[in-house]
Amino acid sequence: MNSLKTWLAVKECHLDSAKEIFKDSGFQITTDGKVYLGSFIGPDHMKDVFVQGKVKSWLTELEGISSVAINQPHAAFCAFTHGVVNKWRYLFRTTGQTEESLQPLEDAIRYKFAPAVTGRPAFGENK
């Protein structure tokens, strides 16, 4: 095991005892949490920051797919359903985030992606 790559995520109340117990191990210790296998382990406030960053990058991806959807709707829809959505499912299944953190993605799908794929106004809008 490579101790330089090994992190121990502990609660703030256990930090001092963790440092004492693992002082000679070379393990790195954090109370802020760490990314692990594409998800996040740590306190809720840091998990929220991590998820917000992911949502921001996915919004950029969704913008790109939406621009492709204008001329290639089927290809864009396939990229959306087989690529992008699976990343979302995995992260939200492993971090346990709430629906509120998905709202920017829902808005982008409703107002940008779906109209680009269908060639019609956003769902629920009367035009």
Image (tube, grey):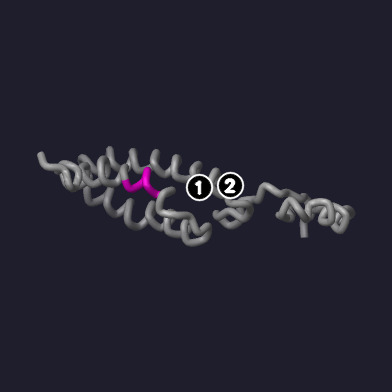
Q: Nearer the viewer, residue 66 or 20?
A: 20
The disc, 2 or 1, on the residue closer to the chain's N-terminal end is: 2
- Quadrant for the N terminus, please: bottom right
* Extent of the magenta region: 102-106
In the picture provided, is 103 more to the left or to the right than 29? left
Can you tell which of label 2 and label 1 is closer to the viewer? Answer: 2
Point out which mark residue 3 bears. Answer: none
Q: Residue 45: image x %, image y %? A: 58, 47
Mark 2–mark 1 contact, CB under 8 Å? no
Q: Is residue 109 visible?
A: yes
- Quadrant for the C terminus, please: top left
The Cα atoms of the two marked residues, 2 and 1, are separated by 10 Å
Residue 92, placed above or below residue 30: below
Label 1 secondary element: helix
Q: Residue at x 31, y 44 (%)?
A: 107
Residue 16, placed above or below residue 57: below
Q: Residue at x 19, y 47 (%)?
A: 123
Circle 1 sits on which residue?
51
Query: What's under tag 1, amino acid-wise?
Result: Val
Label 2 secondary element: helix
In the picture provided, is 62 more to the left or to the right than 45? left
Q: What secondary structure characterizes most of the magenta part?
A: helix
Circle 2 sits on which residue?
45
Query: What's under tag 2, amino acid-wise?
Result: His
In the picture provided, is 82 more to the left or to the right than 71? right
Q: Residue at x 80, y 53 (%)?
A: 27
